[in-house]
Amino acid sequence: MQVKDVMTTGIACVDTKSSAADTAKKMRDQNVGTVLVVDGNQVAGMITDRAIVTKVVADRRTREARRSATS
């Protein structure tokens, strides 16, 4: 068996300039947890729903909590 026999096709992609919010919406709309990030025709990386939660959402909430504590 070859990789092409079991790979996923129709991959969701976003541009490197896409926002985390737009990427999360694409994940929701396409019911996927991983999206390839492209720069032109080159794959620049990938992002997961977990990365958005742990690096964007959680960080934002931490900053907001710190702001509230100092206000």
Image (cartoon, helix red, strand yellow):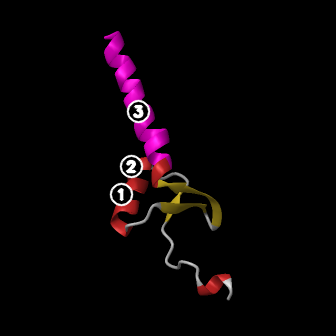
Q: Most prominent secondary structure in the magenta stretch?
A: helix
**Please, what secondary structure does the residue beneath circle 1 have?**
helix
In magenta segment, residue 41: no
The answer to whether residue 19 is above or below residue 12 is above
Quadrant for residue 3, please give it: bottom right
Q: Quadrant of the C terminus?
A: top left
Q: Secondary structure at mark 2?
A: helix
Q: What is the crowding at mark 3: few (fewer than 14 residues within 10 Å), some, or many (at least 20)? A: few
Q: Residue at x 63, y 68 (%)?
A: 41
Residue type marked 1: Lys
In the rendered image, which residue does mark 2 sit on?
A: 21
Observer-nearest residue: 48 or 37? 48
Depth check: give the residue in front, 63 or 54.
Answer: 54
Label 1 Cα neighbours within 10 Å, binned few <14 / some 14-19 / many ≥20: few
Q: Tell me: 45 left or right of 19.
A: right
**Quarter of the image where one finds residue 5:** bottom right
Total number of numbered discs in the rendering: 3
Residue bounds of the magenta highlight: 51-71
Which quadrant of the figure contains the N terminus? bottom right
Q: Is residue 59 magenta?
A: yes
Kindly identify which numbered label has been placed on residue 60.
Answer: 3
